[in-house]
């Protein structure tokens, strides 16, 4: 890798993994040109990303050859796709956000969820997407647990005030 470049999986590289996985669901291997077309980026951009992903152990790639995901790449792509799907469904079905916006939000937010956050969100999602009267106690316990995790007994007044300020701004 070039000097100064971090040897980590960045959100941009995760986007490449997701696209490769999508391609591999329809055909046995991906090509640089297919990835570039799907992502709307240049061929050299894809080539550089594939080199980095190969160095990190996420893809098998040789110049001018086919691209496949390693087991590590498959695991990360599945995890990313699951987070994106759950977030998209949450924004759409629970929050009532239109589908195109929900899709964009899910792609962006999913990059910033660590394992613990993903697990907490999964639990919250499961409560909210299947919510009915029987889930009230479960939601209450989840919220109490959440506050314990951050050492908060009650929501502070300034948090409530911020909500009111935002509502005032939205009114004509």
Image (cartoon, grey):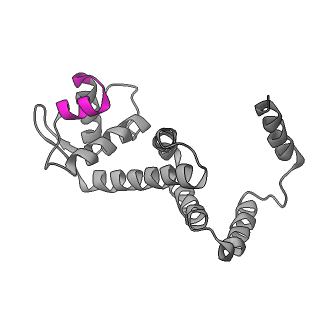
The C terminus lies in which quarter of the figure? top right
Relative horizontal placement of residue 52, taking residue 163 as reference (left or right): left
Q: Which residues are magenta?
A: 33-44
Q: Tell me if residue 59 comes above or below residue 170 in the rendering.
A: below
Using the rendered image of the protein, determine whether residue 58 is visible from the camera's viewpoint: no
Q: Residue at x 30, y 25 (%)?
A: 41
Residue at the bottom extreme, as displayed: 134
Judge whether residue 38 is colored magenta. yes
Judge whether residue 87 is colored magenta. no
Instruction: State the image coordinates of residue 94 (x, y, percent, origin top left).
Output: 59, 55
Relative horizontal placement of residue 110, taking residue 123 as reference (left or right): left
Using the rendered image of the protein, determine whether residue 168 is visible from the camera's viewpoint: yes
Q: Tell me if residue 122 comes above or below residue 99 in the rendering.
A: below
Instruction: State the image coordinates of residue 120 (x, y, percent, origin top left).
Output: 58, 61
Tell me the quarter of the picture where residue 139 sits: bottom right
Magenta stretch mostly in which secondary structure? helix
Q: Nearer the viewer, residue 136 or 156?
A: 136
Q: Nearer the viewer, residue 39 or 149?
A: 39
Q: Tell me if residue 88 comes above or below residue 62 in the rendering.
A: below
Q: How many marks?
A: 0
Q: Residue at x 51, y 38 (%)?
A: 101
Instruction: State the image coordinates of residue 95 (x, y, percent, origin top left).
Output: 61, 50
Residue at the right extreme, as displayed: 157
Tell me the quarter of the picture where residue 13 sits: top left
Instruction: State the image coordinates of residue 68 (x, y, percent, origin top left).
Output: 19, 47
């Amino acid at each position: 890798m070039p000097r100064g470049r971090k040897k980590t999986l960045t959100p941009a590289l995760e986007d490449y993994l997701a696209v490769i996985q999508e391609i591999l669901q329809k055909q046995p291997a991906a090509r640089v040109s297919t990835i570039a077309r799907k992502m709307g980026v240049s061929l050299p951009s894809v080539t550089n990303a594939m080199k980095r992903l190969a160095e990190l152990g996420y893809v098998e790639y040789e110049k001018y050859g086919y691209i496949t995901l390693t087991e590590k790449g498959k695991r990360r792509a599945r995890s990313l796709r699951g987070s994106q799907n759950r977030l998209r469904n949450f924004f759409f079905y629970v929050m009532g956000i239109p589908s195109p916006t929900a899709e964009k939000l899910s792609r962006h937010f999913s990059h910033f969820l660590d394992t613990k956050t993903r697990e907490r969100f999964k639990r919250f999602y499961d409560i909210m997407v299947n919510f009915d009267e029987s889930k009230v106690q479960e939601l209450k316990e989840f919220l109490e647990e959440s506050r314990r995790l951050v050492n908060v007994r009650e929501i502070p007044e300034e948090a409530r005030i911020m909500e009111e300020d935002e509502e005032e701004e939205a009114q004509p």
